[in-house]
Amino acid sequence: MSVTDPTRPTPAVPRTVLRAALDTTARVWLDEAVATIAAEPAAIRKLFPAARRHCGQARLTEHWTVDEAARAVLLTALPRTGPGLADELTRLHRHGDPAEQRAVLRTLPLLDLGDLALPVVRDALRGNDTTLIEAALGPYAATHLPDAEYRQAVLKCVFYEIPLDRVHGLHTRADRELARMLADFAHERIVAGRDVPQDIWPVVRAFPDVITEELAVVEKQFERDRKEEI
């Protein structure tokens, strides 16, 4: 298997960077919100949506915006585990706007949930918001999503033109069946006279027996074009 590893380590909440990005009023609000949630977990239902208003939404790091990081801090402050924690996350995701849903999805790998948060991931993958699909296919999904669902999610990314280097775990989860599905997709694009997404080739090429003669011609042309660009 020679698919290049496109993933990065699970990003921790950048608490130091976050605090430096917040003004005094916002830092006080976040500290008080954390203390309130630790004492009264249900308070997160009001405080979680309010994080953007109090903390802002600027880009913080490559992985986090300010409001996502602040919401991750609130989620990790919840004194709940197991089904109780999963139920609270499900509630926040169900009633949240896309920004709140992204924060829930990005925080999943930082929580000890086992398979309990898979319904949240599946809900995001059923939609057509590409930012939510991308957020759903983070380290948590790479570890817990069943093979068949992971393959369908990758195919959906290709269909929605979400770059595959944003899908966590592809280097280990890609298998012959996924390669076959991507090869079939490529064949359909060729028949329709449409371009084949370039980032499917590393997966398809790792399983040469799924490459038909027709696909081989397209793949060789892709390689020539890539070398010329270099």
Image (spheres, rainbow, N blue to C red):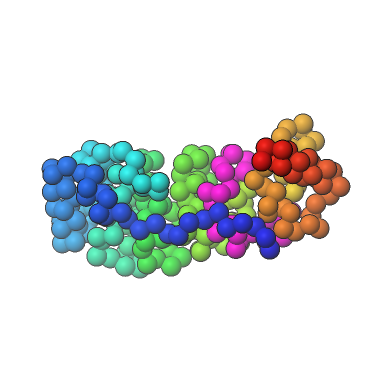
In the rendered structure, which segment of residues is drawn in magenta? 157-180
Q: Where in the figure is residue 137, as x and y percent of width and height?
A: 50, 52
Q: Nearer the viewer, residue 56 or 61?
A: 61
| Residue under the image location 37 percent in, 55 percent down | 107
| Residue under the image location 57 percent in, 58 percent down | 5
| Residue under the image location 34 percent in, 40 percent down | 59
Q: Main secondary structure of the magenta part?
A: helix
Q: Where in the figure is residue 74, as x and y percent of width and height?
A: 25, 54
Task: Using the rendered image of the protein, determine whether residue 104 is visible from the camera's viewpoint.
Answer: yes
All told, the count of numbered labels is: 0
Q: Where in the figure is residue 209, as x and y percent of width and height?
A: 81, 58
The correct choice, above or below, for 131 with respect to 83 in the image is above
Q: Nearer the viewer, residue 196 or 5?
A: 5
The correct choice, above or below, for 53 with respect to 61 in the image is above
Q: Nearer the viewer, residue 156 or 62?
A: 62
Task: Give residue 187's quadrant in the image.
Answer: top right
The answer to whether 132 appears left or right of 22 in the picture is right
Which residue is the extreme one toward the right?
213
Task: Using the rendered image of the protein, determine whether residue 93 is visible from the camera's viewpoint.
Answer: no
The answer to whether 196 appears left or right of 32 in the picture is right
Identify the image quadrant of the C terminus.
top right
Task: Give residue 87's quadrant in the image.
Answer: bottom left
The answer to whether 189 appears left or right of 9 in the picture is right
| Residue under the image location 46 percent in, 44 percent down | 132
Identify the image quadrant of the N terminus.
bottom right
Quick check: is 136 in the magenta stretch?
A: no
The correct choice, above or below, for 104 with respect to 226 in the image is below
Q: Where in the figure is residue 217, as x and y percent of width and height?
A: 83, 43
